[in-house]
Image (cartoon, rainbow, N blue to C red):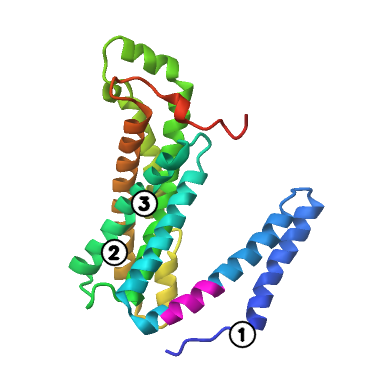
Amino acid sequence: MNIISLSSLDLAIAASLLIVLSLFSMLLSLGLEKKIILLSCRMTAQLLLIGLVLRYLFASGSLFLVLSMATVMLLAAGREVWARQQRKIAGISGFTLSIAAMFVSSFSVTALALTVIIRVEPWYTPQYAIPLLGMLLGNTMTGISLAMDKMTDQLYRQRGVIEQRLLLGQTWQEASRDLRSDCMRTGMIPIINSMAAAGLVSLPGMMTGQILSGTPPVEAVKYQILIMFLIAAGTGFGVISAIWMSGLLLFDKRHRLRLEILTPHKGG
């Protein structure tokens, strides 16, 4: 099966749908038309740029370039996780925590998949390493950001209850156990919903792309199952590590709550 190439006209026809959507936004006074146009242009520029970068990267196959690209992706994902929180841990500590959680969720799982499951030679082959890492980073950061956002918000809202428990002699782990468990469940909801709907309600993007490119459906399904397993595991490990590390920062060695390290809520 030959791949059907898309022309600029084909993409322009698809883009016209967003122009129509922007017009509806104006008519309905939704105020989203500027965001729709600007972000679609930004997305197009970003994807075209990454396409050029990947073409060069795939041709070189350099370990240094692959690790450099992966580092940039990790830093960008960590920043997104940190920026999405309403009450974020201020300073370099919060940013570092987000990067560390993304490293656990994506880098470690990607390395395991490349060396143990897929067993590609060499393990850093960019055609496998970069797309796989990108899918893991993109999907796990949603769960991690949700969990961390709820952690800081609920600690602030329930600070009275938490501090009373601490005064009664509980450790910070005991005082915040229920809250942390609830935050971990919140972080896992997106991937749980995705697994429940995969194949029944939706056809995941990687599987669809492989089928369109001519890969036999059963082989495409195998790869999609692998990706879903990796995303679920990565999200779980990332959420658990993010909540644990957040607790280490938000409570001091004397088990006192440190809400002063949080930035003010965006809404006031």
Task: Give the image location of residue 214, x and y in percent.
Answer: 40, 83
Q: Identify the element where label 2 is drawn.
A: helix
Q: Residue at x 47, y 50 (%)?
A: 79
Q: Residue at x 45, y 61 (%)?
A: 202
Amino acid tagged 1:
Ser
Q: Residue at x 38, y 67 (%)?
A: 68
Q: Identify the element where label 3 is drawn.
A: helix
Question: In which quadrant is the N terminus drawn?
Answer: bottom left
Q: Main secondary structure of the magenta part?
A: helix
Vertical relation: 4 (above or below) 137: below
Q: Is residue 122 left or right of residue 131?
A: left
Amino acid tagged 2:
Leu
Write down the residue under mark 3.
Answer: 102
Q: Earlier in the sequence, mark 1 or mark 2?
A: 1
Question: In which quadrant is the C terminus drawn?
Answer: top right
Task: Give the image location of residue 196, x and y in percent.
Answer: 38, 52
Write down the residue under mark 1.
Answer: 7
